[in-house]
Image (tube, grey):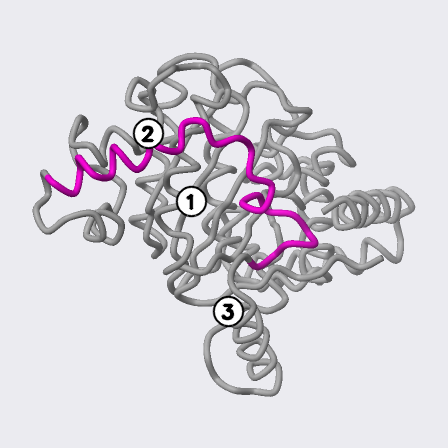
Amino acid sequence: MARKPRVEVEGGLYHIMTRGNNRGLIFDDASDYQKMLRLLGETNTKLTFYLYAYCLMPNHIHLLIERREDAVGRVMHRLLTGYSGYYNRKYGKVGHLFQMRYKAILCQTDQYLAELVRYIHLNPVRAKIVSNPAAYRYSSHRGYLGLDEPGLVDYEPVLRHFGASKKLARERFDEFVRAGMKMGHRKEYYPEEERRILGSEEFVEETKRRVGEIRRGGGERVNNRSAPDLNGIIEAVTRACRLTAEEICSRSKQRSIVMAKEAMIIVGQEQGASNAALAEAMGVHNSAVSRGLDSGKTRLKESREMQKFVKQIRKLVAKVELED
C-alpha cells in the first residue's frame, strides 16, 4: 500500500512530533537540550517558518509551526540531521538517532492554535516529570509567561486572544493552561496517517479543494507530494551501507562512501528530491549531484554490490512508507 503524501500548504499550521529510535533517549543532559534549541534558532534563520510552541521531552520532540516558503520536510531535515550529527559525535555513537520519519498534521489555526499550544506545554505534566508546566525548562511555556527571555517563539498570535495588555494576557493564558492540567491524552492532536488534517468538516473539505486545484495547475505554492524525507533516506543509506550520516555527507573519496552517495542520489531522485535538495543534504554543489547520478547509474548497471545497496535502500524506504 503506497503512503499517502503529506499535505503541505503554505501558511498551514503543523503539529510535528518526532521520537528517538525505538523510543530511546535523545537528550542526555542540559547541554543537549540547549543544543537542540540553538539548532532550532539557526534553522529558523536559514529557512522561513513561524514557531508557536515547542516541547523537548527526553525521548521525543513536539513543535507547532506555521509553514511559509520552505517545506516542512526541508525544515525538519536540517534540524534533525544537525542534531543527530552533534549527538553521535558527542557520545561516540553511530547509526540513526531518530525514528526514520517525523509525523506532521495540518491543523485549523483559528480553532486549534491555543489548544495545541496548551496541549504541547502540558506534555511534561502528563509524563509526571513536573506538576506545574512552568517548572519545565525545555518548553516554550515559560516564555509565554514572561519567565524566560523572549527567544525563538512568536507569542503574539496566541496571547492577543487572552487580553489587551501583555500582563493580563499572560495571566489568562496561565489560567487556560492550568485548566487543562487534568486533560488526558488527546489522540486527535497526534499526527497519524489516517488523520493528516485536523479541523472542521468545512476546513478539511476546503483544504482538499485547494490541493485539488494545485494538482490541476492552480498556481498556489502547495507541496502535495510532500518534500521527500531526505533525513529518512540518509538513515536508510546508513543501514544498507553500514556508514554514518557524517561519512555519507563527507567529502571522502573512499569507494564505499562514493557508492553510498551515488545510491542516495538515485533513490532520492526516485522519491522526488531535487538536485538542490540533495546537494544541500550532502553538502555539495548541484553539479556534483548531477555527476553522481550519471556515475551511479553506470555503476548500477555494472556492479552487483551497487545493485544490492540500491535494492536495500529502496526496501528500507518503502518499509517506512508502509509504516507511516
Secondary structure type for disc 2: helix
The quadrant in which residue 170 appears is top left
Badge 2 is on which residue? 178
* In the rendered image, the vertical position of residue 144 relative to residue 261, given as above or below: above
Mark 3, secondary structure of its residue: helix
The percent position of residue 123, horizontal first and vertical second, equals 46, 28
Q: Look at discs 3 and 2 and give the one toward the viewer.
A: 2
| Relative to 274, 171 lies left or right | left
Point 30% across, 37% down: residue = 176
State yes or no: discs 3 and 1 in contact (Cβ < 8 Å).
no
User: What separation in Å lies between label 1 and label 2 (alpha carbons)?
Assistant: 14 Å
Q: Earlier in the sequence, mark 3 or mark 2?
A: 2
**In the picture, residue 238 is in which quadrant?**
top right
Element under disc 1: helix
- Residue position marked by numbered label 3 in the rendering: 203
**Which amino acid type is marked by label 3?**
Phe
Give the magenta part as a residue range.
Answer: 168-197
Q: Residue at x 85, y 57 (%)?
A: 1
Q: Nearer the viewer, mark 1 or mark 2?
A: 2
Q: Which residue is mark 1?
A: 116
- The amino acid type found where label 2 is placed reads Arg
Amino acid tagged 1: Leu
For residue 310, side relative to residue 53 (left or right)? right
The residue closer to the viewer here, 302 or 46, is 46
